[in-house]
Amino acid sequence: MKLTQLRYWGVLLACALVVLFLLPEGVMEATTGQGFSTKLLLEIIIGYLQSGKPIANITFTTYGSTALITAKFFIVQLKLAHYMKIPPKVMFLIQILGSLLPCLVSFSVGWWFLYSVKNICHPELLPKGSPWTCS
């Protein structure tokens, strides 16, 4: 059994739905100041496609909703940079660097924990009351 229970087509479907809903949700939020949440719709879709797999449902919903929120936030930042006369290429480069740097730091810290805490993946060998576990 896979840890996430979500197959590759689930990730691709989440990305496709983000692309599909980005324009209508972005236009609605830009014109009215009020957006709508697609999180419930994403939960319904994956709940129908993969019923009985809660980790897959949570993973799919998280990928879809987080990607949509991030994409809208990037667009808002580009709009603000346009008003401040910051060149779009510079702003885009800063956004990409600001997205990649936290990913690399988070991955590095997680990797470091896996190899620095002894017996992290063997809960029976850890000291009693230890907060460290490994999935």
Image: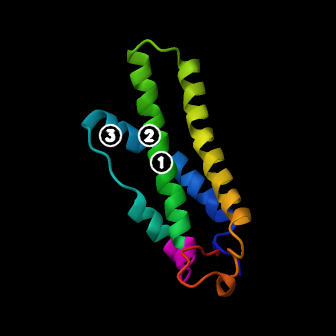
Q: Is residue 92 magenta?
A: no
Q: Amino acid at mark 3?
A: Glu
Q: Main secondary structure of the magenta part?
A: helix
Give above or below for 85 relative to 95.
Answer: above
Extreme right residue here?
A: 115
The one nearer the camera, 61 or 96, is 96
* Rendered residue at 49%/41% (across/down): 71
Q: Amino acid at mark 2?
A: Lys
Give above or below for 114 relative to 120.
Answer: above
Query: Which quarter of the rendering shows the N terminus?
Result: bottom right
Write down the residue under mark 1: 68
The numbered mark, 3 or 2, whose residue comes first in the sequence reads 3
- Cβ atoms under marks 1 and 3 closer than 8 Å: no
- Cβ atoms under marks 1 and 2 closer than 8 Å: yes
The numbered mark, 1 or 3, whose residue comes first in the sequence reads 3
* Rendered residue at 59%/52% (across/down): 15
Task: Please provide percent x and percent y for residue 98.
Answer: 56, 35
Write down the residue under mark 3: 29
Task: Please provide percent x and percent y for residue 16.
Answer: 58, 52
The residue stretch that appears in magenta: 46-56
Q: For marks 1 and 3, give the one nearer the viewer.
A: 1
Calculate the distance from the C-alpha at mark 1 to the C-alpha at mark 2.
6 Å
Q: Amino acid at mark 1?
A: Leu
Task: Please provide percent x and percent y for residue 54.
Answer: 52, 78
Q: For marks 3 and 2, give the one nearer the viewer.
A: 2
* Count of residue discs: 3
